[in-house]
Image (cartoon, grey):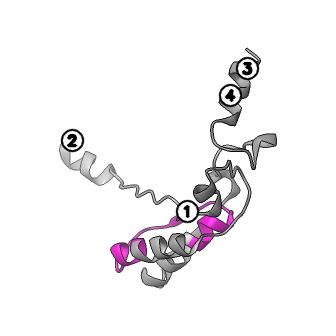
């Protein structure tokens, strides 16, 4: 009985990272910048959508940033029509503050420089 209860109480969580953005290409810190996907990023989103096509999810949760929404759009088009989607700013990545736009590694360099 305990094993059956455990099986009924389990849940699968699938995580999809957004497709490529210009910040990924230039290796700069994006933070909460709401840039969109590059053409390759859109292709990546389409490929993930094809992989998930027809699967059933109780809900799809995405951040409110453009790159996340653009990644989710083709996925949602290929999921069952009754799939609920929820955009929530609490799902954003860690904010980068004044480091947005700087090259990756800049904040670590500054921290070492200033102790």
**Camera-side residue of 100 and 59:** 100
Quadrant the C terminus occupies: top right
Q: Which residue is mark 1?
A: 61
Q: Residue at x 68, y 28 (%)?
A: 109
In percent of width and height, residue 114 lies at 77, 18
Which of the two marks, 2 or 3, is nearer to us in this view? Answer: 3
Q: Which residue is mark 2?
A: 2
| C-alpha span from label 4 to label 3 | 6 Å
In percent of width and height, residue 85 lies at 56, 71
Mark 4, secondary structure of its residue: helix
**Camera-side residue of 115 and 55:** 115
| C-alpha span from label 1 to label 3 | 39 Å
Range shown magenta: 48-70
Residue 67 within the segment the image draws in magenta: yes
Q: Which mark is residue 109?
A: 4
| C-alpha span from label 2 to label 1 | 31 Å
Which of the two marks, 1 or 3, is nearer to us in this view? Answer: 3
Which of the two marks, 2 or 4, is nearer to us in this view? Answer: 4
Q: Which residue is mark 3?
A: 113
Q: Are marks 4 and 3 in contact (CB under 8 Å)?
A: yes
| C-alpha span from label 1 to label 4 | 34 Å
Mark 3, secondary structure of its residue: helix
Q: Residue at x 63, y 66 (%)?
A: 67
Q: Earlier in the sequence, mark 1 or mark 3?
A: 1
């Amino acid at each position: 009985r305990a094993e059956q209860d455990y099986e009924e109480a389990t849940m699968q969580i699938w995580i999809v990272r957004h497709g490529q953005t210009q910040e990924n290409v230039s290796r700069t810190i994006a933070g909460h910048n709401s840039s969109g996907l590059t053409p390759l990023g859109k292709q990546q989103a389409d490929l993930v959508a094809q992989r998930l096509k027809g699967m059933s999810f109780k809900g799809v949760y995405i951040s409110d940033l453009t790159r996340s929404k653009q990644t989710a759009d083709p996925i949602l088009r290929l999921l069952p029509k009754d799939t609920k989607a929820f955009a929530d700013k609490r799902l954003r990545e860690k904010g980068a503050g004044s480091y947005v736009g700087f090259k990756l590694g800049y904040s670590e360099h500054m921290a070492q420089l200033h102790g």
